[in-house]
Amino acid sequence: MAEPSMTLEIFRYRPEVEQEPTFQSYTVPYREDWVVLDALNYLKDQVDGTLSYRWSCRMGVCGSCGMMVNGTPKLTCAAFLKDYYPAPVRVEPLANFPVERDLVINMDDFMHKLREVKPWIIREQEKPVSAGEYLQTPTELASYKQFSMCINCMLCYAACPVYGMTQDFLGPAAIALAHRYNLDSRDQGQALRKDVVFSHEAIWECTFVGECSVVCPKDVDPAGAIQQEKVAGAIDLVKSVLIPWGSR
Amino acid sequence: MREPYRRPMSPTWWLNKRNYLLFMLRELTVIFIAAFLVLYLVQLARLAQGAETYAAFLRQRSSFGWILFHILALIAALYHSITWFNLLPQVMVVHRGEERVPPVFIAGSNYVVWLAISVVIAWIVLRS
């Protein structure tokens, strides 16, 4: 009996060959335990070495293999063929980003925005190492832990129509990470982040479509993080009007 | 060779996914709600102009078109309220110690308050 197979329709864009992207169909063996990334690796190794895409860990940790699978942003290492079989699967690069080649997007914009929110612990005054760790209770950890699970896979940007239309939008993951550090009891950097986070291009651009949280493979809930920062931003605004002499 | 390709965003993007469509419907409900509020202000103005003007206004409002509009506005207002009520747990996260208060309690509190306010209004309206 012939081995079962299925079709992958893959977005191809080779700037030295074509000006417009095309779709190329490939047949891959169907295996129940294969994910879309396994099928791509099979194609790259056995069928067409020119196919370009990013991947690394194969287990939903590195955040490299995000692509559009049938129009939905997915980690291809977690998108099982059996969930689509026998229908053909369409694989495209993450939406809303410029495409460098085939399934590889240009992530410069995201990397720039990520740096802008200073996603690290900021202290007004660092204490020397000899003074010991910055301690934290389990309750304090619980307040931000969910937002610290982000793996920077950019699926949320691909799901966000606001980012698709307004490239200036700071975007879900960057705001979620700003929120993660703002909530951290060890951090004192909220005032340094607020010019970026409380701006029109950041929290106030979000219309709460909510799809970023639906596609997030780590249940970070970036949409929730943005709304929570809106509350913080509104309180900050009211405070600055009522207590203009306040330190910040 | 580098020539990054930007894919255009379709003007019908919101038809491509159920969640996008539901979001767009939620946004559009405000048109009905805003229209209803404007009409309500007109109604108050007519009431201030005396009983005769107001009676004529009510007769005009009992036409099929106006009733249809009010039914649509009611559906829009319900959809608007329910979808926003259900989004509240994402905006308001309450922790009790290390445990997060279940989202259903946060969303549920909206409905309890809604019911309580409705009972009070019904009591005021129906007591006479």
Image: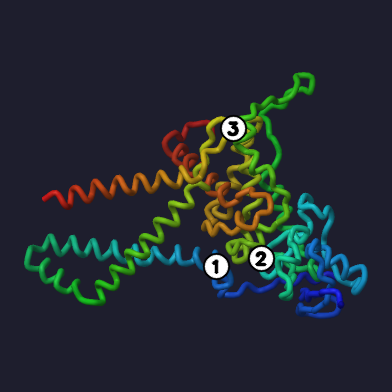
- Quickly name the residue at label 2: A72
Give A59 or A169, whichever is nearer the viewer: A59
The residue marked by circle 3 belongs to what chain? B
User: Can you give x and y, in whole percent of width and height, for residue B70 in the image?
Assistant: 28, 68
User: Can you give x and y, in whole percent of width and height, for residue A247 in the image?
Assistant: 53, 31
Q: Which corner quadrant of the image does residue A154 belong to?
A: bottom right
| Secondary structure of residue under mark 2 | strand
Q: Residues within 10 Å of mark 1 (few under 14, many from 20)?
A: few
Tell me the quadrant of the picture where the C terminus of chain A can be found.
top right
- Quickly name the residue at label 3: B98
Q: Residues within 10 Å of mark 2 (few under 14, many from 20)?
A: some
Residue drawn at point x = 29 percent, y = 61 percent:
B37
The residue marked by circle 2 belongs to what chain? A
The residue marked by circle 1 belongs to what chain? B
Distance (Cα) linking label 1 and label 3: 35 Å
Q: Is residue A248 above or below residue A108?
A: above
Give A220 or A154, whichever is nearer the viewer: A220
Q: Which corner quadrant of the image does residue A117 belong to?
A: top right
Q: Is residue A62 left or right of residue A117?
A: right
Q: Which corner quadrant of the image does residue A44 belong to?
A: bottom right
Whichever of labels 1 and 3 marks the residue nearer the N terminus, that label is 1
Q: How is the image coloured?
A: rainbow
User: Can you give x and y, in whole percent of width and height, for residue A109 in the image?
Assistant: 71, 58
Q: Is residue A46 above or below residue A233?
A: below
Distance (Cα) linking label 2 and label 1: 12 Å
